[in-house]
Image (cartoon, rainbow, N blue to C red):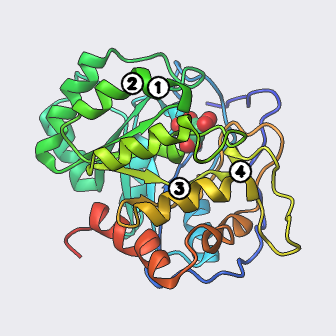
Amino acid sequence: MSFEKTPGWLDWYAGPSKPAFTPPPGSVDAHCHVFGPGHLFPFAPERKYTPCDASKDQLFSLRDHLGFARNVIVQATCHGADNRAMIDALRHSGGKARGVATVKRSISDAELAGMHAAGVRGVRFNFVRRLVDFTPKDELMEIASRIAPLGWHVVIYFEAVDLPELMDFFTALPTTVVVDHMGRPDVTKPVDGPEFGLFVKFMRDHPNVWSKVSCPERLSVGGPKALDGERAAYADVVPFAKAIVETFPDRVLWGTDWPHPNLKDHMPDDGLLVDFIPHIAPTPQLQQKLLVDNPMRLYWPEE
Ligand code: 0GY
């Protein structure tokens, strides 16, 4: 089957630079996706966008180029609840990838066990309306209670303005809860203002809540232009991500978000994204936790 990309679609950046920052040995890219390829793994009929292809082999070669050891592959909404492309990538990773799936209430225990054997360790609940039609909360809660005994966690994706309304649901989840992209703060608002303050309080009051300090390219208003003459791109996102890393050093993860779905104005150089890391995790100790210790505890606890 061949697919036509959404008009204006930006393809991932071929030939990313070599980062100046060297990630510590064993570093994990804890948020990335595979798309198709569409002729092998067709995109879902209910998808809200049609991307370019982004295969497992292309992902693994980016991993090696950037100096990372492992990936956590998050099911992308363009594949709906058909997890075959993601699971195929896990199975061909030689144990170097774990997955986060999208599942429906109708999934059987045998299917969940099969996913676990392939390396899935979480499910993703998405509350971003441009990406999905919402699943009722009682259905999501039922899924959460089914995956909890497997030791899996729930990944949540939402926009900052929606946190107050979603808070009761999030705080009732029975598992570790991992927030995508710091709950998408509006970085034109103050880092110590009420909106981001609510997110910090959410993490402070609930020790089961973790955050990915990812996606500066998606959150930034200033964009990739370096402000200090170095490679400090996306400078307006630094105070937000650094605050979360320094306040909750044992509950943060980092990921590239390759192949960067739905970006409208530019496609990031993934090497530049890696060079964002020392700006938000300035010490070797923080880098070790963010890139190795935390993701290993969550995704490879047996190692
Ligand atoms: C991300 C962000 C986005 C898309 C998805 O699964 C997805 O389609 O997560 C987005 O458009 O903000 O984390 O990849």
User: Closer to the observer: label 4 or label 2?
Assistant: 2
Q: Earlier in the sequence, mark 4 or mark 1?
A: 1
Q: Residue at x 66, y 43 (%)?
A: 190
Amino acid bearing label 1: Phe
Q: Amino acid at mark 2?
A: Leu
**Label 1 element class:** loop
Q: Quadrant of ligand 1?
A: top right
For mark 4, give the secondary structure.
helix
Q: Which residue is mark 4?
A: 217
Q: CA distance from mark 3 to mark 1?
A: 18 Å
Looking at the image, which residue is at 57% across and 57% down?
A: 241
- Tell me the residue that label 3 is attached to: 213
- Tell me, yes or no, whether the two marked residues, 4 and 3, touch with CB atoms within 8 Å: no
- Where the C terminus falls, by quadrant? bottom left
Q: Label 4 to label 3, Cα distance in Å?
A: 12 Å
Q: Identify the residue position indicated by label 2 in the image.
A: 166
Residue kind at label 3, given as amino acid type: Val
**Which mark is on residue 127?**
1
Front position among marks 3 and 1: 3
What's the CA distance linking mark 4 and mark 2? Answer: 25 Å
Q: Is residue 270 left or right of residue 98?
A: right
